[in-house]
Image: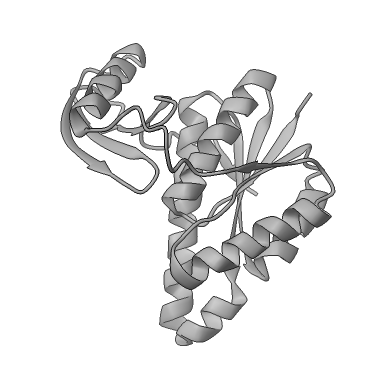
Amino acid sequence: MYDRILVPTDGSEGSAHAAMRAVDLAGQYGASIHALYVVDESVRGLLGGLTGSGRLTEQGRHALDQVAALADASGVEAVTELREGDPADSILDYAEEVDADLLVAGTHGRSGVERRLVGSVAERLVRHAPCPVLTVRLPESDVTVEDAGDAERLAADALADAGFDADIVGTRRQTHLWVVEAESEGDAGDPLVYVDPVTQQTSVVPRPTGRYKNG
């Protein structure tokens, strides 16, 4: 049903939530993930100078690495792409270039002005995308993982299932995800476990192993 799933990311917890959904779909259908980060030209202009632009680029690469690591942990091929320009236009253009079958996007990302910008981006994608768009509304209720202890128990089970001999060393609640840090006794690197506080879905993310490529 799907061969190429496009997931834009802005590096926020919200886009990580959308990426988890996209990777899950890709695993079900044997599809590849195309992760796109757009350095917003308007935000870059507000920051000004090479330092501000460089910081946005570094942030983008880190965000793409996170999505690629999620895909890698699920055995899903991922292609990453970093571009500059208007976010909605760049996403729409890239969707056409890669002939995406599905576009998965969060309904909002960061807070404040950036949150409003991402909301308008999602609306433009729904209206103009050349493929179906799945908007992932970020959970605000029906939380089932309410404390760090619950998150750590789910993370411990996920680590064991993934074959990690690891100790949990830290847990923090981000806006829409629990992030559990672990230290591994093996050679696979120190993993992170993302825990969805509503669905209890877990994703174990080791260090990237090179199974994905830049676009």
Locate residue 77 relative to residue 164 in the image: left or right: right
Q: Residue at x 49, y 30 (%)?
A: 72
Q: Is residue 110 left or right of residue 32?
A: left
Q: Is residue 103 left or right of residue 77?
A: right
Q: Is residue 53 above or below residue 19?
A: below
| Residue at 42% across, 30% down | 198
Position in image of residue 151 (x %, y %): 26, 28
Residue 92, quarter of picture? bottom right
195 displayed left or right of 118 = left
Q: Is residue 173 above or below residue 82?
A: above
Asked if one can make out residue 97 in the rendered structure from this viewpoint, the answer is no
Above or below, 125 relative to 163: below
Horizontal and vertical percent for residue 175? 36, 48
Question: In the current view of this chain or complex, which residue is farthest to the front?
Answer: 141
Tell me where residue 18 sits by quadrant: top right
Residue drawn 79% across and 37% down?
101
Residue 187 can be seen, yes or no: yes
- Of 108 and 179, nearer the camera is 108
